[in-house]
Amino acid sequence: MDKEFTDKIEKELLEQKQVILRSLSAQSEDYKKIMEEAAPGDEVDIASDVIDGKMLETLGTQDSLRLEQINNALERIHKGTYGICLVCKKEIPRERLEAIPYAFMCINCKSRDERRNR
């Protein structure tokens, strides 16, 4: 991968990372607020609050996973291995990296991985 492309991708990854960190921070505050405002004894409201809390936890988990993938992609950029499939060691097409900048597998390897995990 050429330096201009990886610099562009690095900038995008850092921007995505900031968005996720802000989102995780806000979700944590939202979850605390939901739990503090729960009306004791009102089963419908409490159930609703628990569902809202579970949704926030799930969103947090998804964001956490994406944050980890972004950090790994940034590390690969710094090591000079960005854009190389971790499975088959072939170059990942630029189009894929532009669509999913933290991709670590080429389309063929990712497809095989998804079929295996069904």
Image (cartoon, helix red, strand yellow):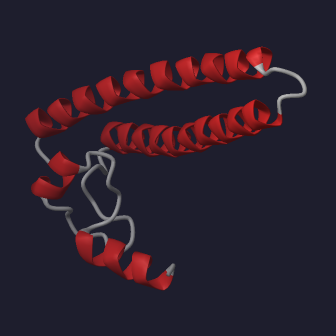
Tell me which residue sits at (69%, 15%) in the image: 33
As rendered, which of 41 and 3 lies closer to the eye? 41
Could you say where residue 3 lies in the image, as x and y percent from the top left? 13, 36
Above or below for 82 versus 16? below
Residue 85's quadrant in the figure?
A: bottom left
As rendered, which of 118 and 56 lies closer to the eye? 56
Could you say where residue 15 lies in the image, as x and y percent from the top left? 30, 24
Could you say where residue 11 lies in the image, as x and y percent from the top left? 24, 26
Above or below for 1 versus 31? below
Could you say where residue 5 lies in the image, as x and y percent from the top left? 12, 39
Left or right of 38? Residue 40 is: right
Above or below for 87 versus 34? below
| Number of numbered labels in the structure image | 0
Left or right of 16? Residue 113 is: right
Residue 54's quadrant in the figure?
A: top right
As rendered, which of 35 and 80 lies closer to the eye? 35
Left or right of 18? Residue 40 is: right
Tell me which residue sits at (14%, 61%) in the image: 93
Above or below for 81 versus 21? below
Residue 2's quadrant in the figure?
A: top left
Tell me which residue sits at (81%, 20%) in the image: 39
Tell me which residue sits at (73%, 37%) in the image: 50
